[in-house]
Amino acid sequence: MHRAVFALILLGLTLALGGCGSGQASVIPSATVAQIRAEYGPLTFVPASLPRGFIFTSWRIEEPPFEYLQPILEMTFGDNGVLLKWTVFDKRDSNDPNVFTGGDCSAHPYASYSRNVDSKKVYYAAGNHGDSAWTCAMPHVGVGLWVENTPGRPSAATVIRMVATASH
C-alpha cells in the first residue's frame, strides 16, 4: 500500500515539475528562455517543437556590423553532429547585403518554394551548404532556420512546420 502511494506521489511530482501536464515540455529550458527574453526583448520567438533527436545547445545575440541594423538572435540545436541554426531578425534588415539574417522578406524572396502553414507563409530554399526555411508573417520580425546539408538532416516539411509554429 505504501509503495503504491509513494509511486502515485512520485508520478504526480514528475508531471507537475516536468511540464508534462501542459501537453509538451519546452524545447528550451524555461530559465534560458526567460534570460533570452530579458536580453533580446519582446521580439523573441522560439521554436515550439524540434525534430526528433535534436536538443537545444546554445544561444547568442549577434551585434550588427553597422549601427543602423538591429541585433540578430541566434539559437542552435543539434543531433549527432547535424546542426540547426535558428534566427530571429528585424524584417527591415533582411534585404541589407551587409548582414545574413536567415531570411528574405522582400517582395520577391529567393525561395525555391513556399507553403502556407497555420496562416503563415513559410519560404524554403535549398543550397549547397544547407537549406533555409523562414517566415516574415510576424509583425516587425522574421524567423529563419538554417539546416546543415548533411545526412540525417530533417526534411523540408519538418523545418517548414518548425518555423511556422514559432511562438512568443
Image (cartoon, rainbow, N blue to C red):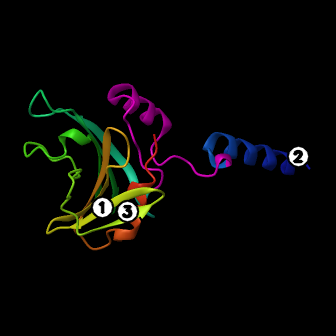
**Mark positioned earlier in the residue sequence (3 or 2):** 2
Residue on which disc 3 sits? 160
Nearer the observer, 149 or 145: 145
Neighbour class for label 2 at 10 Å: few (<14), some, many (≥20)? few
69 relative to 56, above or below: above
Residue depicted at 44% across the width and 61% down the height:
117
Residue depicted at 32% across the width and 72% down the height:
152
Q: Amino acid at mark 3?
A: Ile
x and y percent of residue 28 in the render? 45, 44
**Mark positioned earlier in the residue sequence (3 or 1):** 1
Q: What distance separates the C-alpha of mark 3 from that of mark 2?
A: 49 Å
Outermost residue, front side: 107
Q: What distance separates the C-alpha of mark 2 from that of mark 1?
A: 56 Å
Q: Amino acid at mark 2?
A: His
Return the mark for residue 123: 1
Residue depicted at 39% across the width and 25% down the height:
38
Outermost residue, right side: 1
Q: What distance separates the C-alpha of mark 3 from that of mark 1?
A: 8 Å
